[in-house]
Amino acid sequence: MYILHIPSWFPDESKPFTGNFIEKHIEAISLCIPSVTLRVEKTVEPHKPMEDRLLTPNNRLITYYVHQKEGFLHRFRAKIMTQFMYQKGSVYIEKNYGIPALIHLHVALPMGDFALLLKKRWHVPLMLSEHWSVYHPENYQLISNNTKRKLHQVISKCDGLTTVSNHLMNSIKNLYPIKQGFVISNVCNTDLFVPDQTIRSKKQIIHISTLDHNAKNFIGILNVIKEIKALRDDFVLNVISEFEKPDMVQFVKENQLDDCVHFLGRMPENEVAETLGKNDFLLLFSNYENQPCVILEAFSCGLPVIATTVGGIPEIVNDERGVLVPRKDEQALKDAILKMLDEHTQYNKTDIREYAVHNFSPDQIGNAFHHIYKMLLAH
């Protein structure tokens, strides 16, 4: 018996962090039950052969590649070939590994139609795990009616739904019929993300995100850092992102913040963990979120967090683990940073880390999914 995973988002060479929370869910699930993941990746390399890789004893990744060139016709051809490769992959999987006990779709679109087809062909349950922030009211009004219809079609035909927060679950329930709903958090490698007791000359703040303006409001952070820099010079802000933002770098230069804002660029996960552990607290100022993995990773390192009261963040950040501020409220953010710079050592790092281990470790999350699988299969 095994679970077939169909991820709508998944990391690749060009975007190693995109959908990495889905990859981590699958890794945790494979600790409890054999898992096979099917994905198709676009590539500039012609004729790149498919890969069938056994990542761990219970975790297999099957990847097909589609060659894509620039231009409308080439993109259209790549879209058709992607659909063909998914069909080809399903035939390969059935031939070599048999029919799965259950299909696990990660994010409804764009892979929902394909997952529904396999559900009908194989007569097995279909579970959806949703991470998409499109269901939040401020985002839902921006999507097309066609997208809304597709979401309804997929969600209404799934046998179970999981989300990473109660906030996201309630948002979806307000829009679509759900047969069975469960909240399962994101996962954190609590063995990798550990505290670092090194004492540094300046206080270390860290921000980790895509730096997307609409979602992460990083420019709001820089505005506040500029004001705080005029008051004190005992801190640095370390920034990790897989994307380069020249306008943000220019802002730092123009406002002479180079000595206190350090762009560290893209890092592999082990370096992110090492760097995160050396900081004093995590800083986020998002306009919308579900449950940021970076908060779980900061907790695992024993770090308190400053974040906004959006999405599922208030479900995990409280007075014992950090400070919450309203979205877009730069004065509140300034007050929180000034307070945290002086009081971050008063937080109990051991208690913060234990909270992460007990709630977000791979064993905990894998067992939670396994329990839901057994419920769906029993029905």
Image: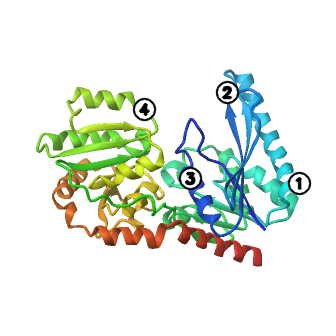
At label 2, the amino acid type is: Val
Q: Is residue 248 left or right of residue 60?
A: left
- Does the image show residue 286? yes
Horizontally, residue 28 falls left or right of residue 117, namely: left
Q: Is residue 273 above or below residue 172?
A: above
**Measured Cα–Cα span from mark 2 to mark 1:** 29 Å
User: Label 2 neighbourhood size at 10 Å, few (<14), some (14-19), many (20+)?
Assistant: few
- Please name the residue that numbered disc 4 is placed on: 244
Mark 3 to mark 4 CA distance (whole Å): 23 Å
Residue shown at 68%/21% (left/top)?
A: 71
Per the model, the C-alpha gap separating discs 1 and 4 is 43 Å
Looking at the image, residue 84 lies above or below residue 360: above
Calculate the distance from the C-alpha at mark 3 to the C-alpha at mark 1.
33 Å
Residue at 48 percent of width and 57 percent of height: 290
Q: Quadrant of the N terminus?
A: bottom right
Q: Which residue is mark 1?
A: 95
Element at label 3: loop
Inspect the image, locate mark 3, and give the three-letter code of the amino acid beneath it. Answer: Trp
Which numbered tag is attached to residue 44? 2
Determine if residue 175 is in view: no
Dot 1: few (<14), some (14–19), or many (≥20) neighbours within 10 Å? few
Earlier-in-chain disc, 3 versus 2: 2
Per the image, label 4 sits on a secondary structure element best described as loop
Considering the numbered disc 2 on the image, is that residue within a helix, a strand or a loop?
Answer: loop
* Residue labelled with disc 3: 132
Q: Position of residue 293 (x, y in %)?
A: 46, 56
- Residue at (57%, 63%) from the top-left corner? 163
- Does label 1 or label 4 sit earlier along the sequence? 1
In the figure, residue 101 lies in which quadrant?
bottom right
Image quarter of residue 370: bottom right
Tell whether label 2 touches label 3 (CB within 8 Å). Answer: no
Q: Amino acid at mark 1?
A: Lys
